Amino acid sequence: MEQEMIVPQGRFQLARLPHRRQETLRAWDAADEYLLTHLAEIGLSDRARIAILNDGFGALAVALHAYRPTAISDSWLSQQATRDNLRRNGLDVANVALLDSLGLPSPGIDCLLIKIPKTLALLEHQLHGLKPRLAPGARVIAAGMVKNLPPTAWKLLERLLGPCTPSLAVKKARLLFVQVNSDLELPANPYPTRYRLEDDELIVTNHANVFSRDSLDIGTRFLLRHLPDRTGYRDLIDLGCGNGIVGVMLARRYPAGRLVFVDESFMALASARENFQTAFADSRDAEFVAGDGLTEFPAESADCVVCNPPFHQQHTVGDQIAWSMFTHAQRVLRSGGELRVIGNRHLNYQLSLGKLFGSCRLVAANPKFSVFSCIKR
Protein backbone atom coordinates (compact mmCIF):
# COMPACT_ATOMS: atom_id res chain seq x y z
CA MET A 1 0.00 0.00 0.00
CA GLU A 2 1.30 3.43 -0.94
CA GLN A 3 0.80 6.28 1.52
CA GLU A 4 1.63 9.95 1.29
CA MET A 5 4.14 11.56 3.65
CA ILE A 6 3.64 15.33 3.87
CA VAL A 7 6.67 17.19 5.24
CA PRO A 8 8.22 20.64 4.63
CA GLN A 9 10.39 19.15 1.87
CA GLY A 10 7.30 18.06 -0.10
CA ARG A 11 4.68 15.35 -0.53
CA PHE A 12 6.02 11.87 -1.16
CA GLN A 13 4.37 8.56 -1.94
CA LEU A 14 6.07 5.83 0.10
CA ALA A 15 5.62 2.08 0.48
CA ARG A 16 7.18 -0.60 2.67
CA LEU A 17 8.95 -3.78 1.65
CA PRO A 18 8.16 -6.58 1.41
CA HIS A 19 4.78 -5.75 -0.11
CA ARG A 20 1.86 -7.32 1.74
CA ARG A 21 -1.85 -7.39 1.09
CA GLN A 22 -3.84 -5.04 3.28
CA GLU A 23 -0.70 -3.39 4.66
CA THR A 24 -1.60 -1.22 7.65
CA LEU A 25 1.88 0.04 8.58
CA ARG A 26 3.40 3.19 7.12
CA ALA A 27 6.80 3.41 5.47
CA TRP A 28 7.79 6.22 7.86
CA ASP A 29 7.08 7.26 11.43
CA ALA A 30 6.58 10.41 13.47
CA ALA A 31 10.32 10.53 14.19
CA ASP A 32 11.00 10.93 10.46
CA GLU A 33 8.47 13.78 10.29
CA TYR A 34 9.95 15.45 13.39
CA LEU A 35 13.48 15.26 12.04
CA LEU A 36 12.55 16.57 8.59
CA THR A 37 10.57 19.44 10.13
CA HIS A 38 13.55 20.36 12.31
CA LEU A 39 15.93 20.33 9.34
CA ALA A 40 13.60 22.66 7.43
CA GLU A 41 13.47 25.03 10.40
CA ILE A 42 17.23 25.29 10.88
CA GLY A 43 18.01 25.47 7.16
CA LEU A 44 20.89 23.42 5.82
CA SER A 45 23.40 24.72 3.32
CA ASP A 46 22.64 23.58 -0.22
CA ARG A 47 26.13 22.08 -0.24
CA ALA A 48 25.76 20.17 3.03
CA ARG A 49 27.06 16.62 2.84
CA ILE A 50 24.44 14.46 4.54
CA ALA A 51 24.80 10.88 5.74
CA ILE A 52 21.74 8.95 6.91
CA LEU A 53 21.91 5.86 9.12
CA ASN A 54 19.24 3.15 9.31
CA ASP A 55 16.56 4.86 7.22
CA GLY A 56 13.86 2.16 7.39
CA PHE A 57 12.25 2.44 3.95
CA GLY A 58 13.95 5.51 2.53
CA ALA A 59 11.65 8.24 3.88
CA LEU A 60 14.55 10.49 4.90
CA ALA A 61 16.60 9.81 1.78
CA VAL A 62 13.65 10.52 -0.52
CA ALA A 63 12.72 13.76 1.25
CA LEU A 64 16.36 14.94 1.25
CA HIS A 65 17.20 13.72 -2.26
CA ALA A 66 18.16 17.23 -3.41
CA TYR A 67 21.23 17.06 -1.14
CA ARG A 68 22.37 13.83 -2.80
CA PRO A 69 22.77 12.12 0.59
CA THR A 70 24.52 8.89 1.44
CA ALA A 71 22.24 6.31 3.09
CA ILE A 72 23.91 3.57 5.13
CA SER A 73 21.94 0.50 6.17
CA ASP A 74 22.45 -3.15 7.04
CA SER A 75 19.19 -4.08 5.33
CA TRP A 76 18.85 -5.14 1.70
CA LEU A 77 15.11 -4.51 1.99
CA SER A 78 15.76 -0.98 3.22
CA GLN A 79 18.03 -0.26 0.26
CA GLN A 80 15.56 -1.71 -2.22
CA ALA A 81 12.67 0.21 -0.65
CA THR A 82 14.72 3.41 -0.98
CA ARG A 83 15.27 2.76 -4.68
CA ASP A 84 11.60 1.89 -5.20
CA ASN A 85 10.38 4.98 -3.36
CA LEU A 86 12.70 7.27 -5.31
CA ARG A 87 11.31 5.86 -8.55
CA ARG A 88 7.76 6.04 -7.19
CA ASN A 89 8.21 9.80 -6.82
CA GLY A 90 9.87 10.30 -10.20
CA LEU A 91 13.30 10.90 -8.66
CA ASP A 92 16.67 9.77 -9.94
CA VAL A 93 17.93 6.77 -7.97
CA ALA A 94 21.46 8.12 -8.47
CA ASN A 95 20.57 11.04 -6.17
CA VAL A 96 21.10 8.77 -3.16
CA ALA A 97 24.30 6.81 -2.62
CA LEU A 98 23.51 3.51 -0.89
CA LEU A 99 26.14 1.85 1.29
CA ASP A 100 25.85 -1.32 3.33
CA SER A 101 26.74 -1.35 7.00
CA LEU A 102 30.31 -2.48 6.34
CA GLY A 103 30.96 0.38 3.92
CA LEU A 104 32.03 3.91 4.80
CA PRO A 105 31.47 7.25 3.05
CA SER A 106 34.33 9.58 2.25
CA PRO A 107 35.32 12.08 4.99
CA GLY A 108 33.71 15.50 5.31
CA ILE A 109 30.17 14.70 6.54
CA ASP A 110 28.45 17.96 7.55
CA CYS A 111 25.23 16.43 8.86
CA LEU A 112 24.79 12.93 10.28
CA LEU A 113 21.18 11.82 10.70
CA ILE A 114 20.59 8.67 12.73
CA LYS A 115 17.49 6.54 13.12
CA ILE A 116 18.14 4.53 16.29
CA PRO A 117 18.20 0.82 15.30
CA LYS A 118 16.75 -2.06 17.30
CA THR A 119 20.24 -3.49 17.80
CA LEU A 120 22.43 -0.88 19.49
CA ALA A 121 25.55 -2.89 18.70
CA LEU A 122 24.95 -1.94 15.05
CA LEU A 123 24.85 1.74 15.99
CA GLU A 124 28.01 1.33 18.06
CA HIS A 125 29.83 -0.17 15.07
CA GLN A 126 28.53 2.60 12.80
CA LEU A 127 29.64 5.39 15.12
CA HIS A 128 33.13 3.93 15.36
CA GLY A 129 33.45 4.20 11.59
CA LEU A 130 31.72 7.53 11.07
CA LYS A 131 33.09 9.76 13.81
CA PRO A 132 36.50 10.16 12.07
CA ARG A 133 34.61 11.13 8.88
CA LEU A 134 32.66 14.01 10.40
CA ALA A 135 33.60 17.50 9.25
CA PRO A 136 34.52 20.05 11.95
CA GLY A 137 31.32 21.44 13.44
CA ALA A 138 29.17 18.67 11.96
CA ARG A 139 25.57 18.37 13.10
CA VAL A 140 24.60 14.99 14.53
CA ILE A 141 20.91 14.36 15.17
CA ALA A 142 19.39 11.05 16.21
CA ALA A 143 15.68 10.32 15.99
CA GLY A 144 13.33 7.64 17.18
CA MET A 145 10.00 6.86 18.74
CA VAL A 146 10.15 7.33 22.50
CA LYS A 147 9.32 3.65 23.11
CA ASN A 148 12.36 2.70 20.99
CA LEU A 149 14.84 5.11 22.63
CA PRO A 150 16.30 3.37 25.68
CA PRO A 151 18.67 5.31 27.96
CA THR A 152 21.46 3.07 26.68
CA ALA A 153 21.13 4.72 23.26
CA TRP A 154 21.76 8.17 24.76
CA LYS A 155 24.68 6.83 26.79
CA LEU A 156 26.18 5.23 23.67
CA LEU A 157 26.02 8.50 21.73
CA GLU A 158 27.62 10.37 24.62
CA ARG A 159 30.33 7.76 25.15
CA LEU A 160 31.45 7.75 21.51
CA LEU A 161 30.56 11.21 20.18
CA GLY A 162 29.88 13.74 22.93
CA PRO A 163 27.15 15.38 25.04
CA CYS A 164 23.59 14.55 24.03
CA THR A 165 20.56 16.82 24.54
CA PRO A 166 17.03 15.44 24.05
CA SER A 167 14.20 17.40 22.48
CA LEU A 168 10.67 17.54 23.76
CA ALA A 169 8.56 14.61 22.62
CA VAL A 170 6.23 15.29 19.68
CA LYS A 171 3.72 12.63 18.57
CA LYS A 172 5.62 10.19 20.80
CA ALA A 173 8.85 10.89 18.87
CA ARG A 174 12.04 12.50 20.10
CA LEU A 175 15.22 13.96 18.66
CA LEU A 176 18.65 13.70 20.27
CA PHE A 177 21.11 16.51 19.49
CA VAL A 178 24.74 15.48 19.83
CA GLN A 179 27.57 17.95 20.35
CA VAL A 180 30.57 16.18 18.86
CA ASN A 181 33.65 16.27 21.08
CA SER A 182 36.62 15.84 18.77
CA ASP A 183 38.90 15.39 21.79
CA LEU A 184 36.93 12.36 22.98
CA GLU A 185 39.08 9.36 22.13
CA LEU A 186 37.29 6.43 20.55
CA PRO A 187 37.78 3.09 22.31
CA ALA A 188 38.56 0.03 20.23
CA ASN A 189 35.66 -1.18 18.11
CA PRO A 190 34.49 -4.44 19.77
CA TYR A 191 33.03 -5.83 16.53
CA PRO A 192 33.08 -8.34 15.04
CA THR A 193 32.99 -10.69 18.02
CA ARG A 194 34.36 -14.23 17.98
CA TYR A 195 33.83 -17.34 20.09
CA ARG A 196 34.60 -21.04 19.89
CA LEU A 197 31.60 -23.19 18.99
CA GLU A 198 30.60 -25.61 21.73
CA ASP A 199 31.98 -29.14 21.27
CA ASP A 200 33.77 -28.00 18.13
CA GLU A 201 37.04 -26.37 17.11
CA LEU A 202 35.31 -23.82 14.85
CA ILE A 203 35.85 -20.15 15.73
CA VAL A 204 32.62 -18.29 14.95
CA THR A 205 32.66 -14.69 13.71
CA ASN A 206 29.67 -12.42 14.30
CA HIS A 207 29.38 -8.87 12.98
CA ALA A 208 27.55 -6.28 15.06
CA ASN A 209 24.01 -6.73 13.71
CA VAL A 210 23.96 -10.53 13.98
CA PHE A 211 21.60 -12.06 16.53
CA SER A 212 23.24 -13.54 19.63
CA ARG A 213 26.72 -12.19 18.92
CA ASP A 214 28.55 -13.63 21.93
CA SER A 215 27.34 -17.23 21.98
CA LEU A 216 25.21 -19.69 20.06
CA ASP A 217 21.54 -18.90 20.68
CA ILE A 218 19.39 -21.63 22.20
CA GLY A 219 17.15 -21.98 19.13
CA THR A 220 20.05 -22.58 16.76
CA ARG A 221 21.65 -24.94 19.28
CA PHE A 222 18.46 -27.03 19.32
CA LEU A 223 18.11 -26.94 15.52
CA LEU A 224 21.70 -28.14 15.04
CA ARG A 225 20.82 -31.29 16.96
CA HIS A 226 17.98 -31.99 14.53
CA LEU A 227 19.26 -31.16 11.04
CA PRO A 228 18.08 -33.13 7.99
CA ASP A 229 19.65 -36.58 7.62
CA ARG A 230 18.09 -37.89 4.40
CA THR A 231 20.62 -38.89 1.75
CA GLY A 232 20.92 -37.47 -1.73
CA TYR A 233 20.39 -33.76 -1.14
CA ARG A 234 22.39 -31.78 -3.72
CA ASP A 235 21.10 -28.19 -3.53
CA LEU A 236 20.70 -26.88 0.01
CA ILE A 237 19.71 -23.42 1.25
CA ASP A 238 20.27 -21.83 4.65
CA LEU A 239 17.39 -19.33 4.55
CA GLY A 240 17.70 -16.39 6.93
CA CYS A 241 21.20 -17.65 7.57
CA GLY A 242 22.38 -15.22 10.24
CA ASN A 243 26.00 -16.12 10.96
CA GLY A 244 25.72 -19.19 8.73
CA ILE A 245 26.46 -21.86 11.34
CA VAL A 246 23.45 -23.93 10.28
CA GLY A 247 24.66 -23.88 6.67
CA VAL A 248 28.20 -24.75 7.71
CA MET A 249 26.93 -27.82 9.57
CA LEU A 250 24.76 -28.77 6.59
CA ALA A 251 27.83 -28.52 4.38
CA ARG A 252 29.68 -30.88 6.69
CA ARG A 253 26.77 -33.33 6.61
CA TYR A 254 26.43 -33.18 2.81
CA PRO A 255 30.01 -32.98 1.47
CA ALA A 256 28.83 -33.14 -2.16
CA GLY A 257 26.05 -30.60 -1.64
CA ARG A 258 25.89 -27.08 -3.07
CA LEU A 259 25.17 -24.55 -0.32
CA VAL A 260 23.45 -21.19 -0.69
CA PHE A 261 23.25 -18.76 2.23
CA VAL A 262 20.43 -16.19 2.08
CA ASP A 263 19.75 -13.20 4.31
CA GLU A 264 18.64 -9.60 3.98
CA SER A 265 21.31 -8.42 6.45
CA PHE A 266 24.66 -7.58 4.89
CA MET A 267 26.40 -8.20 8.21
CA ALA A 268 24.79 -11.62 8.49
CA LEU A 269 26.08 -12.58 5.05
CA ALA A 270 29.55 -11.23 5.84
CA SER A 271 29.57 -13.33 9.02
CA ALA A 272 28.36 -16.42 7.15
CA ARG A 273 31.01 -15.96 4.48
CA GLU A 274 33.79 -15.67 7.08
CA ASN A 275 32.52 -18.69 9.02
CA PHE A 276 32.27 -20.82 5.89
CA GLN A 277 35.80 -19.78 4.94
CA THR A 278 37.03 -20.67 8.44
CA ALA A 279 35.37 -24.08 8.24
CA PHE A 280 36.43 -25.06 4.71
CA ALA A 281 39.21 -22.65 3.65
CA ASP A 282 39.56 -22.97 -0.13
CA SER A 283 38.39 -26.58 -0.30
CA ARG A 284 34.76 -25.71 -0.92
CA ASP A 285 32.61 -22.99 -2.50
CA ALA A 286 29.24 -21.61 -1.49
CA GLU A 287 26.95 -18.84 -2.69
CA PHE A 288 25.90 -15.88 -0.53
CA VAL A 289 22.77 -13.97 -1.57
CA ALA A 290 21.34 -10.72 -0.19
CA GLY A 291 17.65 -10.42 -0.94
CA ASP A 292 14.02 -10.77 0.04
CA GLY A 293 14.06 -14.45 0.95
CA LEU A 294 13.90 -16.70 -2.10
CA THR A 295 11.96 -14.26 -4.29
CA GLU A 296 14.49 -14.38 -7.13
CA PHE A 297 15.16 -18.14 -6.94
CA PRO A 298 13.69 -20.33 -9.70
CA ALA A 299 10.92 -22.77 -8.84
CA GLU A 300 11.86 -26.38 -8.07
CA SER A 301 15.57 -25.63 -7.84
CA ALA A 302 16.43 -26.92 -4.33
CA ASP A 303 16.32 -30.20 -2.44
CA CYS A 304 16.47 -28.85 1.09
CA VAL A 305 15.78 -25.53 2.82
CA VAL A 306 16.63 -25.05 6.49
CA CYS A 307 15.15 -22.03 8.21
CA ASN A 308 15.27 -20.40 11.64
CA PRO A 309 12.99 -17.45 10.83
CA PRO A 310 13.14 -14.03 12.50
CA PHE A 311 10.09 -12.59 14.20
CA HIS A 312 10.68 -8.86 13.76
CA GLN A 313 11.38 -6.34 11.02
CA GLN A 314 13.14 -3.34 12.52
CA HIS A 315 10.95 -2.51 15.57
CA THR A 316 7.86 -4.38 14.29
CA VAL A 317 7.13 -7.85 15.67
CA GLY A 318 5.11 -10.47 13.76
CA ASP A 319 5.24 -13.75 11.86
CA GLN A 320 4.76 -12.29 8.36
CA ILE A 321 8.42 -12.72 7.45
CA ALA A 322 8.38 -16.33 8.65
CA TRP A 323 5.36 -17.19 6.50
CA SER A 324 6.88 -15.43 3.52
CA MET A 325 9.94 -17.66 3.94
CA PHE A 326 7.78 -20.78 4.18
CA THR A 327 5.84 -20.00 0.99
CA HIS A 328 9.10 -19.15 -0.81
CA ALA A 329 10.55 -22.50 0.27
CA GLN A 330 7.47 -24.40 -0.93
CA ARG A 331 7.83 -22.85 -4.38
CA VAL A 332 11.59 -23.35 -4.66
CA LEU A 333 11.74 -26.95 -3.41
CA ARG A 334 11.58 -29.83 -5.84
CA SER A 335 8.93 -32.50 -5.36
CA GLY A 336 10.09 -34.60 -2.42
CA GLY A 337 12.26 -31.74 -1.15
CA GLU A 338 12.32 -30.81 2.52
CA LEU A 339 11.85 -27.68 4.59
CA ARG A 340 13.38 -28.16 8.04
CA VAL A 341 12.22 -25.31 10.29
CA ILE A 342 12.39 -24.35 13.94
CA GLY A 343 9.83 -22.15 15.65
CA ASN A 344 8.75 -21.05 19.09
CA ARG A 345 6.54 -23.80 20.44
CA HIS A 346 3.54 -21.54 21.12
CA LEU A 347 3.30 -20.60 17.42
CA ASN A 348 1.92 -24.06 16.56
CA TYR A 349 3.07 -24.10 12.93
CA GLN A 350 2.39 -27.78 12.25
CA LEU A 351 -1.20 -27.62 10.98
CA SER A 352 -0.64 -24.66 8.65
CA LEU A 353 2.67 -26.02 7.34
CA GLY A 354 0.97 -29.35 6.67
CA LYS A 355 -1.64 -27.60 4.53
CA LEU A 356 1.05 -25.66 2.66
CA PHE A 357 3.34 -28.62 1.96
CA GLY A 358 1.02 -31.60 2.11
CA SER A 359 3.15 -33.15 4.84
CA CYS A 360 4.57 -31.83 8.11
CA ARG A 361 6.13 -33.95 10.85
CA LEU A 362 7.23 -32.91 14.32
CA VAL A 363 10.90 -33.91 14.56
CA ALA A 364 11.67 -32.72 18.08
CA ALA A 365 10.39 -30.36 20.75
CA ASN A 366 11.47 -28.93 24.06
CA PRO A 367 9.60 -26.53 26.35
CA LYS A 368 10.54 -23.56 24.13
CA PHE A 369 10.99 -24.75 20.53
CA SER A 370 9.61 -27.20 17.98
CA VAL A 371 11.44 -28.51 14.90
CA PHE A 372 9.37 -29.59 11.89
CA SER A 373 10.13 -31.48 8.69
CA CYS A 374 7.88 -30.55 5.75
CA ILE A 375 8.10 -32.66 2.59
CA LYS A 376 6.80 -31.11 -0.62
CA ARG A 377 4.44 -33.41 -2.50
Image (cartoon, helix red, strand yellow):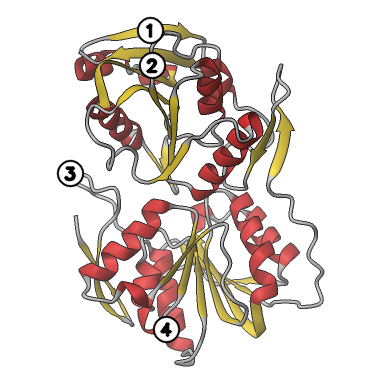
The residue labelled by disc 3 is 21
Task: Residue at 65% x, 75% y: name it.
Answer: 133
Question: Mark 3 or mark 1, which is nearer the start of the sequence?
Answer: 3
Q: Position of residue 163 (x, y in %)?
A: 72, 72
Tags 4 and 1 touching, CB below 8 Å: no
Q: CA distance from mark 4 to mark 2?
A: 51 Å
Question: Mark 2 or mark 4, which is nearer the start of the sequence?
Answer: 4
Q: Quadrant of the C terminus?
A: top left
Q: Is residue 212 visible?
A: no
The secondary element bearing badge 3 is classed as: loop
The secondary element bearing badge 1 is classed as: strand
Task: Residue at 28% x, 38% y: name it.
Answer: 297
Q: CA distance from mark 1 to mark 2?
A: 20 Å
Q: CA distance from mark 2 to mark 3?
A: 35 Å
Q: Is residue 29 above or below residue 339?
A: below
Q: CA distance from mark 3 to mark 4?
A: 34 Å
Q: Is residue 240 above or below residue 233?
A: below
Task: Residue at 50% x, 27% y: name it.
Answer: 247
Question: Mark 4 or mark 3, which is nearer the start of the sequence?
Answer: 3
Q: Position of residue 70 (x, y in %)?
A: 47, 72
The residue labelled by disc 4 is 67
Question: Mark 2 or mark 1, which is nearer the start of the sequence?
Answer: 2
Q: Nearer the viewer, mark 1 or mark 3?
A: 1
Q: Is residue 76 above or below residue 135?
A: above
Q: Quadrant of the N terminus?
A: bottom left
The residue labelled by disc 1 is 362
Task: Residue at 44% x, 22% y: name it.
Answer: 257
The residue labelled by disc 2 is 233
Three-letter code for the amino acid on which mark 3 is drawn? Arg
